[in-house]
């Protein structure tokens, strides 16, 4: 009586990946090593985010990145951590980061077979307020003979061998999926310094009355988007309740909640930003793979499958609607009606 049952058979991410690797006959261990480097980057970034206000890491770095976004000190640190981790893994041929205009080719590893796309700290406008931010990543395997140039990365999300994100919230949560596989969630136990499998085989609920969108942009929305969001707020069925709005403004945090609770997250293309805001390679694509593999859907503003979209350049943008299967279906149906 009163004795707690202690789990002494913990599944760390290292154990998880090792067990996955033996299932794949031709596996060389390269992918597993790459993932080790990835999770180390997540731990380091998490560490600096938690200490930011104590060690003067809040605020701007005094520069702006390629897209003119002002860079925060932590954006710079997160980017540097990520680049070193990928480089030192020896398994990455080329890396695209939101913070770098050009792709970074690791010519010192000419035989490395992987290409990685990342947003090292997504949602950085939330950083100084201590609100959750995250890292998003997507991993491609390069075809034989790839030269390690940025054009190698202009691939649709269907080519992603793995992707996911880490949310730096009350705890660090790593969500990861592999091509054709399920979605698994790990929580960083900071005293052990290990990501522990806490959310095996995550499935997104089929429906849920929650929507997540920056409604301040509604002036610029196209008709079908306006009609869709209106329909959520003014249910036509008798006794129907309007949806709840939840918008953090950190894609990773909004996505994580949507994955767990269900609902829809949208950042539509609009009259002001006809290509949308979020990036295909390291925001929309990886998220779409996670949501599809968890049983949800993800489409762009033309209602095309997000994973099928091929970026025209490495920082190309897209509108996105992603979430519960049935919630995204409603968006698709309304758009179809408009023709
Ligand atoms: P960032 O990569 O510069 O941080 O911008 C991406 C973020 C997403 O996390 C979030 O979904 C979106 O921008 C919020 O944009 P807005 O402030 O326009 O609502
Ligand atoms: Mg971003």
Image (spheres, grey):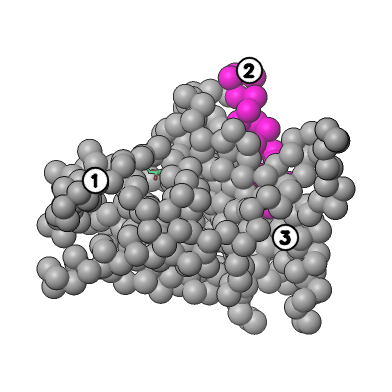
**Could you tell me residue 266's position as x and y percent?**
32, 52
Q: Nearer the viewer, residue 205 or 81?
A: 205
Q: Earlier in the sequence, mark 2 or mark 1?
A: 2
Q: Which residue is mark 2?
A: 54
Residue 62 is inside the magenta segment: no
Placement of the N terminus among the 4 image quadrants: top right
Can you see residue 7? yes
Beta carbon of the mark 2 residue lies under 8 A of ligand 1: no
Q: Is residue 310 above or below residue 276?
A: below
**Numbered label attached to residue 34:** 3
Range of magenta residues: 36-56
Q: Quadrant of residue 316?
A: bottom left
Q: Is residue 254 left or right of residue 106?
A: left
Q: Earlier in the sequence, mark 1 or mark 3?
A: 3
Give the residue displayed 63% in from the left and 49% down from the top. 174
Q: Is residue 156 left or right of residue 268?
A: right
**Could you tell me residue 206's position as x and y percent?**
41, 62
Q: Which residue is mark 1?
A: 242
Residue 37 is inside the magenta segment: yes
Please report contact status of discs 1 and 3: CB closer than 8 Å, yes or no: no
């Amino acid at each position: 009586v009163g004795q707690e049952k202690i789990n002494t058979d913990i599944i760390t991410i290292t154990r998880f990946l090792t067990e996955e690797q033996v299932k794949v006959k031709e596996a060389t261990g390269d992918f597993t090593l790459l993932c080790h480097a990835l999770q180390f980057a997540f731990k380091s970034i998490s560490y600096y985010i938690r200490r930011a206000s104590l060690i003067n890491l809040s605020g701007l770095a005094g520069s702006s990145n390629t897209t003119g976004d002002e860079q925060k000190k932590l954006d710079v640190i997160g980017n540097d951590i990520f680049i070193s981790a990928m480089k030192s893994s020896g398994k990455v041929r080329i890396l695209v980061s939101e913070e770098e205009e050009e792709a970074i080719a690791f010519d010192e590893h000419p035989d490395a077979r992987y290409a990685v796309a990342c947003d090292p700290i997504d949602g950085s406008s939330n950083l100084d307020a201590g609100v959750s931010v995250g890292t998003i990543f997507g991993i491609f395997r390069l075809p034989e003979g790839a030269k390690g140039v940025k054009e190698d990365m202009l691939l649709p999300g269907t080519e992603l061998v793995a992707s996911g994100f880490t949310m730096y919230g009350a705890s660090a949560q790593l969500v990861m999926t592999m091509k054709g596989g399920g979605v698994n969630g790990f929580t960083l136990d900071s005293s052990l310094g290990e990501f522990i499998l806490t959310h095996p085989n995550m499935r997104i609920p089929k429906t849920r009355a929650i929507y997540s969108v920056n409604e301040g942009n509604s002036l610029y929305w196209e008709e079908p988007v306006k009609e869709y969001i209106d329909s959520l707020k003014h249910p036509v069925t008798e006794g129907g309740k309007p949806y709840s709005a939840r918008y953090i403004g950190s894609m990773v945090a909004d996505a994580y909640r949507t994955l767990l609770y269900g609902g829809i997250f949208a950042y539509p293309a609009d009259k002001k930003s006809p290509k949308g805001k979020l990036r295909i390679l390291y925001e929309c694509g990886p998220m779409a793979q996670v949501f599809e593999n968890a049983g949800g859907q993800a489409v762009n503003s033309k209602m095309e499958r997000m994973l099928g979209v091929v970026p025209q350049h490495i920082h190309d943008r897209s509108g996105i609607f992603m979430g519960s299967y049935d919630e995204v279906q409603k968006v698709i149906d309304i758009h179809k009606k408009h023709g």
